[in-house]
């Protein structure tokens, strides 16, 4: 099942896609350090958190691949037929990450203006961080324990990633 051996191509593709999003992260950091009024952050934080999932949903829905996956010769397809995925599949595939981003935005807005060292922040952000790490570990672990190398988000969306050059 060589066509399903996609761990390293997927990892490198994610790094490439993250690098493509680097300007957003730079602006995000710059805006957070600048002295802008809170209203600005109520607009900027949700927008910056939505960019990467929107990119992933659009590229997977339209092409079945992100730019990173194109470069690494892997593609997301429907698990049953190995045909092109729909935008619904692409959205479902990104749903967990989208929910984590929304939660992060909500926490960020609720605690906007709090001192980052505040005791009040430690519990919600600690729990959120723990849940995020548990999800990531479960997502990757699932990948290694099934024949088609599907991660949890692939199960949610009914997708699988295959090599395009096999």
Image (cartoon, helix red, strand yellow):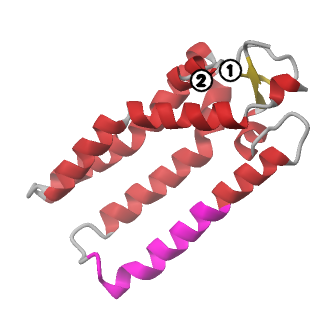
- Disc nearer the start of the sequence (2/1): 2
Residue 102: in magenta span:
no
Q: How crowded is mark 1: few (under 14 residues within 10 Å), some or many (20 or more)?
A: many
**Residue 25, how many percent across, how many down?**
31, 44
Part of the protein shown in magenta: 116-134
Name the residue tied to disc 1: 75
Quadrant of res 8: top right
State the image coordinates of residue 102 (x, y, percent, origin top left). 46, 52
Mark 2 touches mark 1? (CB < 8 Å):
yes
Relative depth, front residue between 4 and 153: 4
What residue is shown at x 64% (from left), y 55% (from top)? 136
Q: Name the residue under label 2.
A: 69
Residue 70 location, x and y as percent? 58, 17
Residue found at x 17% / y 53%: 39
- Secondary structure found at label 2: helix
* Residue lying at the far bottom of the rendered structure: 119
Mark 2 to mark 1: distance in Å?
Answer: 6 Å
Q: What element carries label 1?
A: strand
The quarter of the picture where the C terminus appears is top right
Residue 140 visible: yes
Q: In this view, does 149 lie above or below 28?
A: above
Residue 92 visible in the picture: no
Residue 68 percent location from the top left of the image:
53, 25
> Mark 2 Cα within 10 Å, few/some/many (few <14, many 20+)?
many
Residue found at x 66% / y 64%: 134
Figure disc tally:
2
């Amino acid at each position: 099942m060589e066509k399903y051996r996609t761990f390293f191509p997927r990892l490198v593709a994610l790094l490439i896609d993250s690098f493509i999003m680097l300007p957003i992260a730079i602006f995000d950091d710059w805006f957070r350090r600048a002295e802008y009024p809170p209203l600005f952050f109520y607009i900027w934080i949700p927008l910056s958190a939505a960019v990467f999932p929107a990119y992933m949903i659009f590229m997977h829905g339209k092409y079945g691949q992100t730019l990173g996956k194109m470069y690494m010769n892997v593609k997301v397809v429907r698990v049953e037929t190995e045909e092109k995925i729909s935008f619904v599949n692409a959205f479902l595939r990104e749903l967990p990450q989208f929910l984590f981003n929304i939660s992060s935005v909500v926490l960020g807005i609720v605690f906007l203006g709090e001192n980052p060292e505040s005791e009040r922040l430690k519990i919600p952000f600690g729990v959120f961080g723990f849940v995020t790490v548990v999800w990531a570990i479960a997502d990757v672990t699932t990948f290694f324990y099934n024949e088609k190398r599907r991660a949890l988000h692939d199960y949610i969306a009914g997708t699988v990633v295959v090599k395009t050059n096999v």
